[in-house]
Amino acid sequence: MSDSRRKFIKNSALLSAGIGLSAGFPDRLMAGITPTRMFQDKIRVGAIGINGMGWSDLNSMLKNNPEVVCTAICDVDSNVVTKRLGDLEKNFSMKPATYGDYRKLLDDKNVDVVIIGTPDHWHCLQMVEACQAGKDVYVEKPIANSIAETRVMVEAQKKYGRAVQVGQWQRSNAHFKSALEFLKGGQLGKIRMAKTWAYQGWMKNVPVQPDGPVPAGVDYTMWLGPATKRPFNPNRFHFNFRWFWDYAGGLMTDWGVHLVDYALLGMNAQEPISVMASGGKMAYPDDASETPDTLATVYDYGDFILLWEHAQAINNGNYGRDHGIAFIGNNGTLVLDRGGWVVIPEKGKMEAVPDVKRSDDGLGNHTKNFIAAVKSRDFTQLTAPITAGANVAQVCQMGNIAYRTGKKLFWDKQKNGFNDAKADAYIKESYHNNYKLPKI
């Protein structure tokens, strides 16, 4: 193939991703241009769920990786699809194929990589089916809405051998990495406690609303998927799905997976010995949400304790920060959040470390890391592989299970359960509407 011919095909692909070339091109130029050749040297991305983080992930992937093109988008809300089509054409000169059913996107041979930005209750099915379809996957956190789903997802990645990155992008921020390097240096002495918290003052109440008609353009049956069939209620749709057990796990899994993840990474920890939790709807007892707006969770790891706290409608968190991770050692405490990190010394035991500020784009770094692994096929270079996502999702689910049972629970590693009937019932998510938990 000549250089001019190659350049033509590549440029045409960028201008017409996913919908084919204009009918005005002569037949002799169209002949022999298969979808693969149209996008020669390009990584073709399709995004499922493009209203929130799925859209942010796609934007980041396109902005930071010139070899990436968007060839397909999918959402159950056609209004969102229309909006994102306009955004992609305006910002990237791309016109991808559009779908309302994610399975059709997975069948699209013009897609190499799939972004999953749907509500939590869909992540497992879509990630597994994407791997089965031969796609590499960038899946939003938390990876699943149950402990059983996390295990299935890990096994699916192993069986089908696909690159799977979890959207725990803080792992890719330079200041998070430097904080971890300092922690591993041992200057803090023995770490007794790791605290994690999210005090989110901007999260207001969810006023009770009656059930109503499904909005025009929304495939509500597909949105529900494996969740319990219920009448449409605007409170359960789009952003607020986070506060209902059918689809997610509240702040414990929404923010918790980001912050608890780094505490586990710093302590090189996995399952705890025991977990207990206490909280409830203390800020907005009468609003529509189901998950607690106030929660304190204690994990016992034997040689250290991990704490999680969250509170909606309050900003004044630990150490004057509305979110963060604190590693509390005998010699001092390292406090870390998305803005930077400091070390607060115990008097006479070590020197203070002034604020190390955030200096880069964690999400941009994260999507670049993923695309690099897709290209190299070296999955060991992934910053947040599926095993990392499964580890923290499981720990956060344990916290929610302890809250929902009202018990101190002890984890049996050999049996992968609590040896408590009420708690063990929450390990496996119930699938409805003829959907079944995948078997690998």
Image (spheres, rainbow, N blue to C red):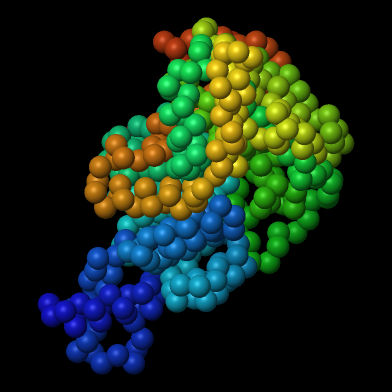
Residue at the left extreme?
1
- The image quadrant that residue 46 belongs to is bottom left
**Quadrant including the N terminus:** bottom left
**Quadrant including the C terminus:** top left
- Residue under the image location 43 percent in, 49 percent down: 365
- The image quadrant that residue 72 belongs to is bottom left
Left or right of residue 212: residue 71: left
- Residue under the image location 85 percent in, 36 percent down: 284
Viewer-proximal residue, 344 or 337?
A: 344
Viewer-proximal residue, 363 or 330?
A: 330
Viewer-proximal residue, 4 or 96?
A: 4
Task: Estimate the x, y position of residue 169 in percent, counting from the top left.
Answer: 49, 43
Residue at the right extreme?
286
- Residue under the image location 63 percent in, 55 percent down: 220
Above or below 2: residue 97: above
Task: Estimate the x, y position of residue 124 in percent, counting from the top left.
Answer: 47, 40
Task: Estimate the x, y position of residue 341 in percent, counting from the top left.
Answer: 57, 34
Left or right of residue 28: residue 318: right
Task: Estimate the x, y position of residue 157 in percent, counting from the top left.
Answer: 34, 38
Can residue 219 be seen in the rendering of this structure?
A: yes
Viewer-proximal residue, 120 or 341?
A: 341
Left or right of residue 426: residue 33: left
Can residue 131 be seen in the rendering of this structure?
A: no
Please tell me how many numbered marks the rendered image carries.
0
- The image quadrant that residue 380 belongs to is top left
